[in-house]
Image (spheres, rainbow, N blue to C red):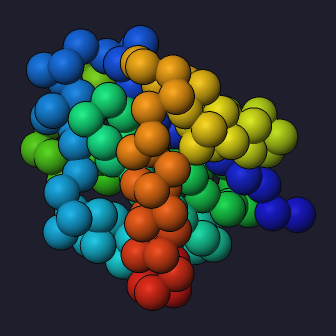
Amino acid sequence: MTDIVLIGLNHTTAPVELRECIAFTPEDTLVALDQLKQEPAIDEVLVYSTCNRVEILMATNDIPVAVDITKKFIASIHQIPLERFEGVLYHRENDDAVRHVFRVAASLDSMIVGEPQILGQIKTAYQTATQKKA
């Protein structure tokens, strides 16, 4: 059975200095999609990174392995020790992950509730992942 898992950090869990270190550029996102999709435990992947959050949503056949791989990938691509940010990461599984993404897309989990940019950012992330067949 395929599960859905999301890991991320945002304005409520991490200070801006750390969010800036973990932020994915468009180029980082392409690398993440390519590399994470190659992992046997990860069937599909979506990455969205804004000024207030970084989240990676995955379809997986092994949640613990996918989460571990993704944490290590974040540390590696940003050249930051995992210990520096692991404590501020959250992860959601299955229905909770889907609900979380809907709350984010609806701007209910934003620093300013109702801000209009996040939905467009998630749409762009989805289009990028689709183009990369991630």
| Relative side of 48 to 76, left or right | right
| Relative side of 76 to 130, left or right | left
| Relative side of 109 to 5, left or right | left
* Image coordinates for residue 39, horizontal then vertical, percent: 49, 71
Q: How many marks?
A: 0
Q: Residue at x 74, y 44 (%)?
A: 98
Rendered-image quadrant of the N terminus:
bottom right
Relative to 33, residue 75 above or below: above
**Could you say which quadrant of the image residue 44 lies in?**
bottom right
* Image coordinates for residue 73, horizontal then vertical, percent: 32, 52
* Image coordinates for residue 103, horizontal then vertical, percent: 65, 33
Q: Residue at x 51, y 50 (%)?
A: 119
Q: In this view of the protein, can residue 89 be seen by the observer? A: no
In this rendered view, identify the residue nearer to me: 101 or 105.
Answer: 105
Which residue is most to the right? Answer: 1
Q: Residue at x 41, y 75 (%)?
A: 128
**Could you say which quadrant of the image residue 36 lies in?**
bottom left
Relative to 116, residue 19 above or below: above
* Image coordinates for residue 19, horizontal then vertical, percent: 23, 28
Q: In this view of the protein, can residue 77 be seen by the observer? A: yes
Q: Residue at x 52, y 28 (%)?
A: 114
| Relative side of 40 to 78, left or right | right
Relative to 9, residue 76 above or below: below
